[in-house]
Image: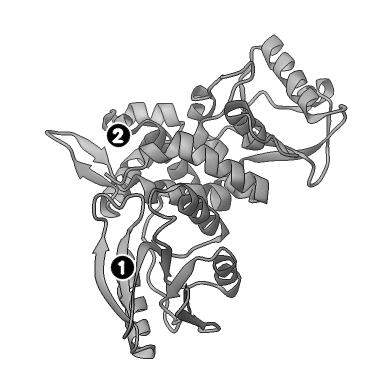
Amino acid sequence: LGTQILRVALEHLKLAHADIKPQNVILRERGFSPFDGRITLKTDTESFQYFLEIKAHPRPETIRHLMVLRDTAKGAKSIPILVVADYLTPNLAAKLREAGINYLDTAGNLFLKRAPTLYMQVEGKKPSSPVAGLKTRLFQPSGLALLFGLLTEPQSINYPYRRLAEEAGVALGTVGWVMRDLRNNHFLEPAGKNKLSLINTKDLTEQWVQGYARTLRPKILIGEYGNLAPHLEDVVSSLNSYTTNKNEKWALTGGFAADEVLHHYRGQKLAFYVSDWWSIAALKELPIVPVARGDITVLKAFSPLVLGKSRSPSEYPIAHPLLIYAELIYQGMDRDMETSRMLYAEYLEADLDNR
């Protein structure tokens, strides 16, 4: 799919702008991770090199993740990124321009700006026929639950199917079609006799983060609440005491969790995962009250792995960095994005090597 999107977008560029000549297109060359490749655009007088990022059906979370990538990846400060997408809505295109990120899409929309001589912008083009998407159920809720375990523990790709199903809390049949879709969409490769290896983990993680925001989080949202205590920190302390006394599991995510591991920024929102113990009885003992769009978000652990993989650098249980990162990207405020960059660089980037 990525190759098709790139081909169509470059054909539009060549037909409409004959003075721009794409050259030296290299896809997935080792040493250019975590990007999809690189490309040179040549004019009559100059050549401009870019890192390539190819996107199918991009969403706001795609742009936020891309901004993190630009600010953390080696080489991205000296060589700019060129996003090539099937279609960029006017809103997404504007966000890319605001961030100073160049783009092309298959409809003919583009933004190319390189000081001092290159500036091109085309807006308002509509796709005549959409590029077909991946035929996959990977990013449905049960697929996302299983993928979370595979991304956070890549060696589990070779576990027996029954063990994978039990650990992720999904049906045994889910494992079969997830494995098939991973293979069909080039996220699996042989790694020795009867062994498999998860590959293209940067792309898979990016799509998982999008799926978390679009599909999974709305499904696991238990409720939003207001704070009856003097500070949100008091809610965390009360929650920790309550769960300790009841011998129940929970885990912080989002800004509060990021602050526990980075000691940088806590934010004005509190979010945490719980299991089946959450009920009206819990509400009676905690200083919170149901409020639409409140500062406290309670999320149901979508898999036993959510609470089983919690980390505790402090007195409170902390969700896995991938979950913290996904929640920060979902929130998307400036300080959330700043924190997400730090979290990505310290805890996630090294593992997403596009093997």
Residue 341 rendering spot, x and y as whole percentages:
53, 44
| Crowding at mark 1 (Cα within 10 Å: few <14, some 14-19, many 20+) | some
* Secondary structure found at label 2: helix
Which residue is depicted at the point 30% across and 53% down?
32
For label 1, the SS is strand
| Type of amino acid at the residue the image marks with label 2 | Ile
In this view of the protein, which residue sits in the foreground, 260 or 225? 260
Quadrant position of residue 10: bottom left
Q: Judge whether 73 appears above or below 264 on screen.
A: below
For label 2, the residue is 157
Residue wearing tag 1: 39
Mark 1 is on which residue type? Ile
Q: Is residue 341 above or below residue 59?
A: above
- Observer-side mark, 2 or 1, equals 1
Residue at image position (88%, 30%) is: 228
Within-10-Å neighbours for mark 2: few <14, some 14–19, many 20+: some
Cα distance, mark 2 to mark 1? 33 Å
